[in-house]
Image (cartoon, rainbow, N blue to C red):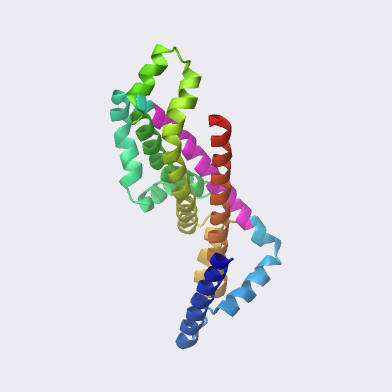
Amino acid sequence: MKKLVKNLVVILIWLGIWQLISMFTGLELLLASPVAVLRAFCRLLKTKSFYAVILTSTYRILLGFVIGTCIGIITGCISGKSDMLSSFLKPVIQLMKSLPIAVFIIMLLMWFGSKWISTIISAIIVIPLIHFAVMDGIKSTPVKFLEMAQVYRVTGLRKIRYIYFPNIYSRFYSQCKTTVGMCFKAGVSAEVIGLASGTVGSQLYYSKLYLTSDELMCWGISVMLVSFLCEKLVLLLLGNLNRKIVK
């Protein structure tokens, strides 16, 4: 209860600061007040298109997250078990990790168009993070555990379940906690640049174009809330998976 009250007080303070800044600027076009944003939110919630847009962007971004996670697990396992393949994959993974995301967005728009741009960009964001988490987990597995498994002739699946998985899980969990939010930020940014129709990114662009800062804030807050909920859902699923595997 104390934590809840503290959080509410902090939120109210920041809302007050936001209201004061909006009043001092005197320009609702540039910075809408919290009250104006709330009104816009209520207006948007009454429209079917709002839910369609949110669901479209969420589906495409989460699809990219799932695809990127699967690819990252596969490449991480390969790199963790083979130094030669690790060296072979390293330039591609490093490119995904280091090259500015805007470069990928522009190149992908030239090649594939804007429809699935957020999915591909989300996958590109996830792959290197999951790759290194899995690879490091495998490489840091204590040798004595593997030697013991060999002595007692532990099967491959049991070795993965009881030796590799516990060592990988904490790193994997931590990266998933980070990547879900990153996927939404990068995915929506890609939608804005690519003007993908029927997505949050396109709505943000039109809000900027028509100077409707209240709707701009509404879409931004909506993305933040959906990202938060998706992150909690992913972590909940991972926690349940961990309990079922290690029990």
Asked if residue 88 is positioned above or below residue 187 in the image, the reply reads above
Q: Residue at x 50, y 77 (%)?
A: 13
Residue 130 % position (x, y) = 42, 39
Q: Is residue 32 magenta?
A: no
Which segment did they paint magenta?
53-77
Q: Is residue 134 above or below residue 30?
A: above
Q: Position of residue 12 (x, y in %)?
A: 54, 76
Q: Residue at x 37, y 29 (%)?
A: 138
* Secondary structure mostly seen in the magenta stretch: helix
Q: Is residue 19 left or right of residue 101?
A: right
Q: Position of residue 227 (x, y in %)?
A: 54, 55
Q: In the image shown, does 48 or 97 lie closer to the viewer?
A: 97
Question: Which image quarter: residue 35?
Answer: bottom right
Q: Is residue 216 visible?
A: no
Q: How many marks?
A: 0
In the image, residue 212 above or below residue 219: below
